[in-house]
Image (cartoon, grey):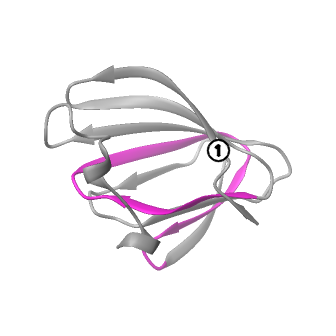
Amino acid sequence: MLPGAFTSEWIWKQDDGACRKIQIPLNHIWFPHRHRRHKKIIVIEAGRASVRVEQTTLNRERGDSISLPKDTWLEIKNIGPEPLCLIEISFSEINRKWYLDEDWETENNA
């Protein structure tokens, strides 16, 4: 599996949240990360994924959703056979700061 290498496109942004479409190529990983002050809902629009939430790993496919409380570790791997397409909806407890670097943490800088 190769790290990183995902693309995203904003669908909408508001003061307290946002929605974006994310594509992860075959055999790539959306690296482990967490957001300390916002929660997410992720819906798999196309493809198959191995999803690690904290220490639990589950396989998910088109139509499945994942609900993440704030401060929860997440890693998503595209397990194929096509590009993985996700819809991510984020909700914040603080206005206009839901996506700033201060709310983003990877396992390497935790």
- Compared with 74, 42 (above or below) is above
Q: How many labels does the image show?
A: 1
**Residue 28: which quarter of the image?**
bottom right
Residue 21 location, x and y as percent? 55, 31
- Compared with 12, 80 (above or below) is below
Q: Which residue lies furthest to the left in this view?
A: 94
Q: Which residue lies furthest to the right in this view?
A: 81
Residue 62 highlighted magenta (yes or no): no
Q: In this view, does 96 lie to the left or right of 100?
A: left
Mark 1, other Cα within 10 Å: few <14 / some 14–19 / many ≥20:
some
Q: Residue at x 13, y 40 (%)?
A: 94
Q: Residue at x 77, y 59 (%)?
A: 79
- Compared with 99, 57 (above or below) is below
Q: Is mark 1 on a helix, strand or loop?
A: loop
Q: Which residue is drawn at 28% across and 32% down?
A: 17
Q: Is residue 101 left or right of residue 73?
A: left
Residue 97 location, x and y as percent? 21, 38
- Compared with 15, 38 (above or below) is below
Residue 60 location, x and y as percent? 63, 57
Q: Which residue is drawn at 28% across and 63% down?
A: 71
Residue 37 highlighted magenta (yes or no): yes
User: In the depicted view, which residue is nearer to us: 38 or 96?
Assistant: 96
Residue position marked by numbered label 1 in the rendering: 6
Dividing the image into 4 quarters, which one contains the N terminus? bottom right
Dividing the image into 4 quarters, which one contains the C terminus? bottom left
User: In the depicted view, which residue is nearer to us: 62 or 78?
Assistant: 78
Amino acid carrying label 1: it is: Phe
Magenta: predominant secondary structure element?
A: strand
The residue range painted magenta reads: 28-55
